[in-house]
Amino acid sequence: MMGKIHVLSEQVANKIAAGEVIERPASIVKELIENSLDAGADHMEIVVKHGGKSLIRVADNGSGMAADDAQLAMQRHATSKINTAEDLFQIESFGFRGEALPSIAAVSRFSLQTRTPDAVSGTELVVEGGNLVKAKECPVAQGTVIEVRDLFFNTPARRKFLKQDSTEMGHILDAVTSIALANLKVRFLLESGGNKLLDLLPVDDLSARARAIFGDAWTDQTLPIQNEIPHIRLFGLIGKPSLASGNRTQQFFFINRRYVKAYGLSHGLQAGYHGLLMQHQFPAAVLFLELNPQYVDVNVHPTKQQVRLSHEVLIKSLIEKTVAAALKDHGDLAPSFESKGGRLEVPLSSSGYQEPKFSFEEVTAMPSMPAKISETTVDEPIPADATTFQAIKIGKGPKIIRILGQIQRTFILAETEDGYIIVDQHAAHERVMFESLMRNFQSDRPAVQGLLMEEIVELHSRQVEILKKHLTVLNKIGFEVELFGEKVFVVRGIPSVLKEENPVVVIKQFVDELETGKAQTNLQGYQEDIAALIACKRKSVKAYDALTLLGMQSLLEQLSRCENPFNCPHGRPSFIKYSLLDLEKQFKRK
């Protein structure tokens, strides 16, 4: 009786491998370019047609291959990159599996021409569906030229899953872009359907390559960063908050020059922007990590874009601290007016901004704003003479020389030395109040307001356990809450800065958010969540509140003293800069 187990043929095995290595035409482009880089190429041309479905051609000036090596390279697991299993922990090349070429050839009409520097003639191989149909000498320049035609012609089920040509071309462009960012000394030419999409000349620094790829407007909104600890070096570009978008497509991470998809590193980057971005907004960055190959496992997935890091927590912390320090040191993170097309470079959520849901009763708009904006903010008195105005400098940004007035009782218009700014009065005062509340919360002994009558908070069983777990944290920031029975808590005190708030509402809202995973679970997080909500909902000036000139002056002076005056606690910009040059361009004076 015959057994059920049998060995698959080489042809079937190659097709299976192709399903892992080749997700789409962009996967082929990536593999071929990386092979060229491993061969020492510093010039390569990529030509595609119909999004890579009908043609992908990659030509390089690398070291090429001898005839025997070329034929051997068409076999699975044939590679020049590693010899032993131990070599997997010292990978310094892009490729090492020996699967790319046979996998590509198994699902396409494949041709290869190659020549080494010392050879008189080159070698040509033609493979169709994994079957070698031609091998001969040929005249060819030093390097390698690979053509991949009719992708998935022999696996129609795979071909039907390919997207429109424009979509596949977009993925190819992304693949070339990511590789070009890490290889500054290499010239990349990308052509599609006779149109030149990229022509990236060799450059000396990352900013120049980023400018060639993303343009001036993008690059001008980035900051260089660099830091180093034993065995790990971090460098690259990070975008200002105004460059953030609703997804992570503007984030590029490289480990030892290899482009990787590392969500853990992305979280470290996001943490560095704490308090500077709106919810569901993601910063832009091109970050490089150099570390000992022993700390990186690239043998995780056939595409080699997913890696494991043995010191990921340390690396995330390095990214977070370096990014946060760079943003703080820059000192001018206010978004600017982009004169091209009259467009504002301000990040907005795709679904629009939504105020946090919190059950505070609304405050009636004030007819005018007093000089002292809030009882919780202690400031020096405002001069009685409204004509007396001292220039106000906000961070390292613009110096305000005159307040012009309000726009729609929502925005403050002020003149600066080189133009003007428009201030969102609600966002600006949210920031002022937020930092005032945070200073109170973070004091060693926050002031507690005892309640004349104890308040009772009744919760269901699951919420009872949640609140019990976090009572210590609440009491540290000035609440006096304790369990009183099985499902009931008694509130005897509330932080003095919240003395006008309903303590039951505050506590129930945060228990609800803890239950849904929306609230922070550490002391700093609690403080910031509470402060942001109170500053937004109750304490701050609203849109449509009429302000006096003295009120506007007081608000701007208090904003200038904030640690971060550029946005409200939810990430919205508090003001936008306009230069005189931008204004002159709009009126065709320049």
Image (spheres, rainbow, N blue to C red):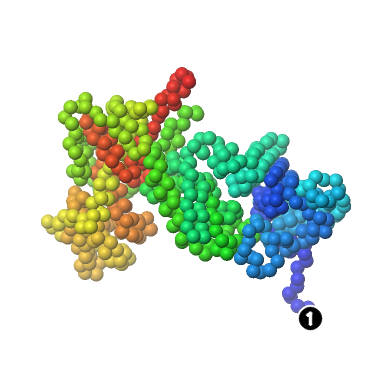
* Crowd band around label 1 with a 10 angstrom C-alpha radius: few (<14), some (14–19), many (20+): few
Type of the residue with mark 1? Met
Judged left or right of residue 379, residue 287 is right
- Residue lying at the far left in this picture: please name it: 452
Residue 425: image location, x then y, percent? 30, 36
Q: Nearer the viewer, residue 217 or 355?
A: 217
Does residue 491 appear left or right of residue 542 in this picture? left
In the rendered image, the vertical position of residue 103 relative to residue 225, given as above or below: below
Task: Give the residue displayed 61% in from the left and 41% down from the top.
Answer: 203
Q: Secondary structure at mark 1?
A: loop
- How many marks on residues? 1
> Which quarter of the image is occupied by the N terminus?
bottom right
86 displayed left or right of 398: right
Determine the residue positioned at 76% across, 55% down: 105
**Where's residue 94, x and y in %?**
65, 56
Q: Which one is nearer the viewer's eye here, 206 or 349?
A: 206
237 lies above or below 488? above
Name the residue: 29% across, 33% down. Answer: 392
The reply to whether residue 19 is in sight is no
Residue 346 image position (x, y, % from top left): 43, 37
**Residue occupying the point 25% across, 54% down:** 441
Decide if residue 284 is on the left or right side of residue 21: left
Residue position for label 1: 1
Residue 428: quarter of image:
top left
Residue 335 shows in this picture = yes
Hey, which residue is sitting farthest right in the picture? 136
